[in-house]
Image: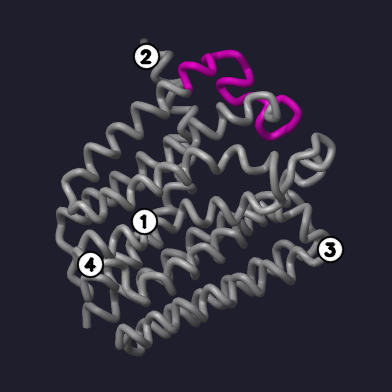
Amino acid sequence: MLEKLKLYAELIRFNRPIGTYLLLWPTLWALWFASKGVPDFKFLIIFSLGVFLMRSAGCAINDYADRDIDLHVARTKNRPITSGRITANEALGVFGALILIAFLLVIQLNTNTILLSIIAATLAASYPFMKRYHSFPQVHLGAAFSWSIPMAYTAITNNPPPLEAWLLYSASLLWTTAYDTQYGMVDREDDIKIRVKSTAILFGKYDNLIIGILQALALILITITGILAGSGILFYIGILAASTLVIYQQFLTQNREPAKCLQAFLNNNWLGMIVFIGIAADYFI
């Protein structure tokens, strides 16, 4: 039983929490903006646990969807399903259990937020299959990873998400598309061979340029959100610091070396954290 639990932990990337962090930061941005810097502890607990559960569920359904594709990609061929250590049905069971637990959390919130959570689950479940049908699976991931933003606003205000929420949502979607394209650059050669689609393939030689534009637009939208929220100097210092990381990531990926592209992808954890620190510190003072 213990060995099986270890395999399930590997399935949900428990030992690689980068995805949880990247989903957490936009959620915290939204909670702080929506609550004017003083989020209720209940919301912090529910949304933080929800982030972990939904990211974990996303990993499980992703490995189920990609169980044949992963065989042909060097980085993924030893994942639990592909290597035969757990079955596809077990992965579906893990996904279902995690979604159920997440739903038990969200029913502690208001009805409007519960309704929005149905969209969140639909986006999370459908994302892994998109690379077979169109070249923008990274955009679909952005839509899924960012949906906690309107949910956070609705949970706190019990009203439809305001303009600020949708600006922040759009920023997070663009940012996610950018960093997941960097991630796609790691596997680009394998993906071309097995004919799966991604923005990393679609953008071609313009990949770094488009990533930079997407990240710049994301920071501009976050800045506009801050202006509407009446943010002060520490918020803008955070945006400036995040901008330097965008430049650093461009430096990392300029030669498109897979290891450097992965490093640039991982660096986005710091970008999201710095933006959050700027938001939280500004409200604190």
Question: In the rendered structure, which disc, 4 or 1, sits on the residue that comes first in sequence?
Answer: 1
Give me the residue at 27% from left, 39% from top.
103
Q: Secondary structure at mark 3?
A: helix
Instruction: Read off the magenta span.
Output: 71-91
Q: Secondary structure at mark 4?
A: loop
Question: In the rendered structure, which disc, 2 or 4, sits on the residue that comes first in sequence?
Answer: 2
Question: In the rendered structure, which disc, 3 or 2, sits on the residue that comes first in sequence?
Answer: 2
**Marks 4/3: CA–CA distance:** 44 Å
In contact (CB < 8 Å): disc 4 and disc 1: no
User: Foreground mark, 4 or 3?
Assistant: 4
Q: Which residue is mark 1?
A: 148
Q: Quadrant of residue 210?
A: bottom right
Q: Which residue is mark 3?
A: 205
- The answer to whether residue 35 is magenta is no
How far from the left and from the top, in percent, is residue 118?
35, 45
Question: In the rendered structure, which disc, 4 or 3, sits on the residue that comes first in sequence?
Answer: 4
Q: Which residue is mark 4?
A: 159
Q: Secondary structure at mark 1?
A: helix
Q: Which residue is mark 2?
A: 2
Q: Which residue type does callout 1 highlight?
A: Ser
Relative to 186, residue 1 above or below: above
**Marks 2/4: CA–CA distance:** 45 Å
How far from the left and from the top, in percent, is residue 85?
55, 14
Is 95 placed left or right of 130 in the picture? Answer: left
Q: Nearer the viewer, residue 247 or 94?
A: 94
How far from the left and from the top, in percent, is residue 143?
50, 56
Give me the residue at 59% from left, 56% from top.
139
Is 18 placed left or right of 79 in the picture? Answer: left
Classed neighbour count for the residue bearing mark 4: other residues with Cα under 10 Å, few (<14), some (14–19), many (≥20): few
